Amino acid sequence: MIEKENPDSLFFLLENYEKQKTIDAPADWEQLQKRITADRNRRLFFSYLRNVAAVLLPLFLAYQYALYPILKENRSTKETITVTSAPGMVTKTVLPDGSEVWLNALSSLTYPQRFTEKGRTVQLSGEAYFKVVSDKKHRFNVETPRNMVVSAYGTEFNVNAYESETNYEVTLANGHIEVSSGIGPKATEVLVVDEKAVLHVETGNIHVVTADTYVETAWKDGKMVFRREKLDKIAEKLSRRFGVDIRLEGNRLKGYEYTATFTDETLEDILDLLKRSAPITYTISKQKQLYNETFTRRVVTIKSK
Amino acid sequence: MKEKDTIYENLFRKVAFQDDEQAFKELFLEFYPAMCVFAVRYTAQKETARDIVQDVFFKIWKNRKSMNITTSFRNFLVTSVRNNCTDYLRRQEVENRYGEKSTLSAAHSSPEEVYTLKELEIIIGEALEKLPLNVREAFVMNRFNGMTYAAVADKMEVSTKTIEAYISKALKILRTELRDYLPLLLLFL
């Protein structure tokens, strides 16, 4: 390979110089600069969009996965559910934490759709048997009328708090519970198994006695168990179970005590049995039709012979 | 030209590291005319050549951060423009497959040496200095002012023959003076 001078190369060089002189570089620079600026602006816009997205996305995710569930939880805790048991019926319900509750006749239980972190609180009016799922972090509180509070972590207990009654009773079947009254001198009692706290509604006094858990809780299995039970108590339970009004005529009647267990007997069967073991008679009034096509409750009147 | 090239390297470094648009403008003004003239040899159309060279500069600006120039900036520029031109010609060839033959073969024999306007000014200016005064005058009038021999002769109040002699003398001297810068024809034997 050898290098040889191009005969026209001098002219080429001179020509090149001439040609270059004709090109207007500053004008074309303006063009290129415009292009660069447009490109930069577009890129700035996209990077701005990206930054906006980078800020908004975590916010959105935080809302979606952290804030929204909390807000939802807050909202749902305000929504409560009330379960009511009709006369003669035992209703079983399961609470949001998995605890089971048996509601005796004419009782109602109110609980939140979801329990909060603070604790598990339900409101009870009437009688209920609680089988609380153990959760050491969240206390389970049962609030009754007259501000009695039964507090536990994971136990089984029966609360009898009909508003019509003069005494509220709490019987412990398993574990530990605390019973505190909201009336009068603030008192708190800790119960152990097979003890019963009796709260006198008027004074707010609590006294603890031993109890037969089977008797107190037999109702949830459809049984009525009486152990040396006064007739007026029995009448009250019967009226709740069968949805009738029972009137006792004469003070002497109230002193009669019975021991019995009823399961699927009818009201008449039970009254016959009561009549057989004590000197009493009873009458059952016929139901009357009211103007609004409904019927009155039957009224049972028990008299001493 | 070596010292000059380091100036361009430094300018490009400013462009790459400091996003210096002013430095980029300097590079553009320096090389744009030379590159356009160079590209015209491939494309044969001045407008296309300008578009291609502008594209090359635009891409350089866009990729200034990621670009890795192993040779000189000048070499890089020449290679980029040539590649873009051949790409353009290849596309043209596909578009009119049965059209006229591409000018690629003609371009092959052209030298690849590229001098900027300023460089040429200096080179040619220095060479012209070496010419006798009247010879230089005649040459400049003829070459750069586009006057005919007769016009030059008329202006200088000498005969056309004398002008012819002046010009041939000028070319002879220039050829010797500019030997280092003249494009070489490569012959393969």
Image (tube, coloured by chain):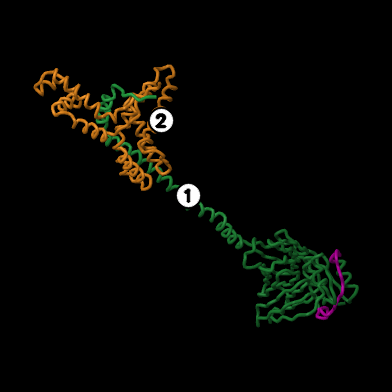
Chain colours: A green, B orange
Q: In this rendered view, identify the residue nearer to me: A84 or B49.
A: B49
- The residue singled out by tag 1 in the image is A53
Residue at the image position 90 percent from the left and 74 percent from the top = A277
Judge from the rendering whether residue B67 lies leftward or rightward of residue B45; answer left or right. Answer: right
- Specify the quadrant that holds the N terminus of chain B: top left
Residue B119 on image: x %, y %? 27, 35
Judge from the rendering whether residue B99 lies leftward or rightward of residue B28; answer left or right. Answer: right
Location of residue A113 (image quadrant): bottom right
Residue A199 sits above or below residue B149 on the image: below
Location of residue A304 (image quadrant): bottom right
Residue B187 sits above or below residue A204 on the image: above
Report if residue B48 is visible in the image.
no
Tell me the subunit letter for badge 2.
Answer: B
Is residue A244 one of those drawn in magenta?
A: no
Residue A282 on image: x %, y %? 85, 71
Q: Which residues are magenta?
A: A250-267
Report if residue A273 is visible in the image.
yes
Residue at the image position 38 percent from the left and 36 percent from the top = B76
Q: In this rendered view, identify the residue nearer to me: A40 or A237.
A: A40
Q: Secondary structure at mark 1?
A: helix
C-alpha span from label 1 to label 2 = 39 Å
Location of residue B140 (image quadrant): top left
Q: Secondary structure at mark 2?
A: helix
- The residue singled out by tag 2 in the image is B83
Residue at the image position 68 percent from the left and 82 percent from the top = A203
